[in-house]
Amino acid sequence: MTAQPTTEALVTPPAPRGLLAKIWHYEPVKRPAWQEKPSLIVTISKVVTLVVVCLAVLFPLWAVVLTSFSTQSAITQAGGLVIVPNGLTTVAYTQILSGGVVTKAVGVTVFVTGVGTALSVIVSVLAAWGLSRPGSVLHRPILFLIIITMFFGAGIIPMYLLVSGLGLINSVWALILPTAVSAFNILIVRNFFQSIDQGIIDSARIDGAGEWRILATIVAPMSKPVISVVALFYGVGYFNAFFNAILYINDNDKWPLQLVLRAYVLQGQSFVNSGTLDTVALDQAQPASLAIQMAVVVLAVVPILVVYPFVQRHFKSGILIGAVKG
Amino acid sequence: MSVITPLGPAVKAMGEEDIRPEQKARAGRPRRKSLWTRLKQDRSLLLMTLPVVVLLIVFAYVPMLGNVVAFQEYSPYVGIPGSPFVGFDNFSRLLQDPAFWHALGNTLTITAFQLVFFFPLPILLAILLNSLMQPWLRTLIQGIVFLPHFFSWVIIVTVFQQILGGAGLISQQLRDIGAEPLNIMTNPDTFVLLLTSQTIWRDAGWGIVVFLAALASIDPSQYEAAAVDGASGWRRMWHITLPALRPVIILLLILRLGDALSVGFEQLILQRDAVGAEAAEVLDTFVYYSGVVSGDFSYGAAAGLLKGIISLILVLAANKVAHMFGEAGVYKK
Amino acid sequence: MNAFEGVSDLKTSRRGFLGLLGFAVITPVLASCTTAAGSGGGAGGGPIGIPKGVLPNYVPVEYVAPDIPGIDGSTPGFLEWPKLVKSVDKVPGVGGSYTAMTPTYGNVVPGLSDSKYLQQVNEEIGAKFDFRFTDNNAYPDKLQAIFASAKDVPDFVTIAEHNIPARFDQALPGLFQDMGEYLSGEKVEKYPNLANIPTNAWKSCVFEGKLYGLPYPSDRMSGSSFYRKDLFDEMGITELPKNADEFFDLTVEITDEKAGRWAGNDLSETAKLIYAVPPKWKRESGKLVHKYESDEYRGYLEFTAKLFAAGVIHPDAVAGNSGENKARFESGKVLLTYDGYSGWIGSHVRTVPTTPTYNQQPLPWFVHDGSAPRFFVSNPAKIITFVKKQDDPARMDEILDLLNYIAAPFGTTEQALLQNGFEGVHWEADPETGAPVKTELGLKEVASTYQWLVRPPVTQNAPQYPDVVTDYCNFMADSMQYGVEPEFYGMQILEPVRLASLSQPFNDLESDIVRGRKSLDDLDAAVKTWKSSGGDELREFYAGYLDV
């Protein structure tokens, strides 16, 4: 098998040595020889689109981050979100982060997300490969078993009784196992697996390789993008989930991060307007300042920013593998 | 020479029959294998699906049996055995409720609107992003646009209010220059637009991810070969990029249809007062307010079942249509 | 939603929410008197009121005399930190372990393993309490789930009046202890602090004729319209409105959009007070008339619609954002708001550090036509804690002793301990007033915990802010003359399940009418529908309770 050079290799000039030299000799990335120079219109529209998109996203983000670092008087003066810095402080963060509740919650979330994602990805990839051959035995029944779960769910009470019956109440595993399998994600991986050129697989099979070997040595390495995507989906699902924790966790030192943050954001006010005035909440609620609410948002996003670069590298375009001679 | 081809055509090319090399070799004696033999032959594959099957049976199907309460008048204190059976009463009550149909109508309107205005965006954005030359720029923009997905709806609605609301940034500026302040957040007639723009803001960047993965599997030498053959940029997109994305797009489209009856919950509850129940009532909120308030579990379960059945039918139909166009769809016939 | 979310997210968030919600519950909205759905009055058929002898005797005991005594049920106030009195001689607990489910309101309280406060108080009272804190917004869902699984129900479950789940009368006998066996009549006198709780509060604990649960007594007046006196003074407004028209003119006067100042948050509750809308029922010539059918209700809706149309309501409030109500009021973006009465002190404490001139005052009572003011007093106990049936009767003795300790009123060492924690660890004495000033640890760890289980009669105390307490107590004492007890005051009446969702359309309707999306004609139509689809039946049902 010959490895084809990646697009990177085609376009990146050799790295100059030394930082100064790097700056002096900086050249923009070269276009590959076969690609024509883009027309002005196309370039302009691309630029405009991208700028608009980035602004639409960045502007609110900027306001959120700035507000989280603003003093109360700056917020009052601005009448809400702060867009021009007017007095900065880290008080919101120290308030949330002190007390160890948040740090404990981070620990819980890291465990649940890490273990859960690993577990989910493994079982999903296995199942996807196991279902990648339409003629295999029990293929249809198992596929339907999985698909049906996308449409029909179970109520809170049966779920609770099940989790309780399994002795998982108050265990972090109650935050992992019930949602470990996503039919949607399995279908995505399966879709990708089925589009892999059969030739390679068949020749491997003829050579006597078992399904496990094929999966591990051929298919999985070539499916890094889709596996990363699915790992991302699962990871974010675990990270964002809070409802299971509400139901199954009794000790608040086992609360995941999202639950803690949600408490701050909702401030004790009843968020579903069921028509009654919750006068108890009026008496008890300690509305967090806008700074705290925004700090909560930032805190929830920071872990994502940390993990993102590691996942992103699998989305680069480039060739993945090689060829089969023949 | 064969390389990894983009998704789709390769599958069709190999055909949809389950002819395996060993069988082909023995061609001339195609015999229906016994179940036992097939089990032995495919045991690895079966074993691979085992964890998922077990997890689903335990955590999805066992509690799903609880949906039997849709046919009862259920009280949790008396339990399923003790609650009386009422047959299809709950369902007929549901179908005769004009509020149900109104909610269904709203739901379908929102779904259709989002299908047209939201669904294509991540695809376009992914292609655009993929065409950027500088990898650092690509990474940066990708990172930026997918952040909003992690904001909870409570925050998103707050932020939208802070910027677009009647007392928000833009309105204040408008007042300063003597113009009328904005009314978007409380206008029931444009609510679908507002909903969709919120969804776009939150999820357009997030949705790119799947398509980028698909685009990542395209062999760049194909582009080179096509260019050498004289294909222009647009033709290369049409003949290489888009076909690469087609199977994923179809899959997601079908799955989206299966999800057509779910258009949000928290996002709608938060804005219910702002625009009124008539504009903000969708199936999920309808069930919540009418079934949940009275603790009518049976009603809620019936609605859930009905929703599931309709969604299932939609997916099966869409899959059939996909087959008619020669696509693999969610599963093959 | 879009298909791009991994379904594991779906399962717990959206679809999950729906599918799960197939069984979810809750919230009967009830206004003040009665609670949610039940399976109809009484197991035997007829409505059961409050049988003779069920209620515990009321034996008030005063450990420390309040500076501002309560009058006709108003809340007494303390302006200084009193000299504490010990009310309970022996350590109440004998080593038992108890779990309790209690609410939190936006704060995250450290649990037993992390909290010195909880650990040390447990030691002090001789029992191990493990609290399962649950955020208020998650409360109804969690309640429903655990009620279905008896072994997961903790020893104490605190439920706010509007969270009482459907069919509760079916849950009660199986799950919870009938406290009447231990506390009815003179039995309560064994526990002086429990006997100190007013009879009205106990009334709210009677379900289907039996005494279940322990009360959390509330102020007789639950909420009020407040205005920013400091800002009014600044603006030179000295006359306060005495009827609806004057109120309307005031709101128009103080609204200045360009300056970012509006008259009020959602003034619906204020308007309800102005029109004296009954919480649920009123009696007119002997017959029950429901709130929805009343003229007061119609009037309030019309008036509020006028307010909204005049643009005096803050746009975010128009957009239903009520979570920011307090923030808007405290920062001066709105000048009028409706708030819980006890929230007054909270707002003051929160805002004075950055706005020293902050001065919030309740709006003096008036009704729409300027006639004699009146308002409806609130439920005597808005929160009730239920005790799970214990297998071992000896535990009940310990439980009662513990509850007696916890119910010690203000002015006792026990109450001071529970409210503030331990000296030197959680608080330091203020050199001037002697009152406890919480340390950082105290602010983090000490929150409403044990006090959810049972609470002594309400008193107000905030020695750092004697002015506020004075205003608070005096205003309330003054208001009592206008207070009116609504029909079925304090009674827990569980409505039949099939009639429980009658009020739901009105919640949306109110929101629509005040914002001009619907008209009063729609109200008339809705009332007609209400009557025919169960309203009249509901009337019959309640009429049965008039005589018990």
Image (cartoon, rainbow, N blue to C red):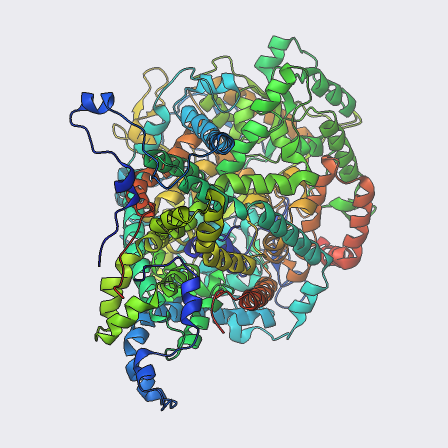
Residue C277 visible in the snapshot: yes
Which residue does the image show at 22% across and 59% down from the upper left?
A1
In front here: A151 or A287?
Answer: A151
In-image side of C209 versus C356 (left or right): right
Q: Quadrant of the C terminus of chain C?
A: bottom right
Judge whether C242 appears above or below C544 on screen.
above
Q: Position of residue A71 (x, y in %)?
A: 41, 19
Q: Give the percent coordinates (x, y) of residue A197.
A: 34, 64
Q: Quadrant of residue C517?
A: top right
In this view, the residue in front, B174 or A266, is B174
How many numbered marks have been drawn onto this rendered protein structure? 0
Residue furthest front in the image: B229
Residue C198 can be seen in this image: no
- What is the x, y in percent for residue B309? 58, 67
Q: Residue at x 51, y 20 (%)?
A: C468
Task: Give percent across and percent down for residue C378.
Answer: 61, 39
Q: Is residue A300 left or right of residue A147?
A: left
- Answer above or below: position of B312 versus B208: below
Q: Name the image quarter holding residue C224.
A: top right
- The residue closer to the viewer here, C60 or A101, is A101
Question: With A56 as the anchor, is C269 left or right in this view?
Answer: right
Q: Is residue A27 above or below residue B26?
A: above
Going 47% across and 32% down the picture, which residue do you hit? Answer: A43
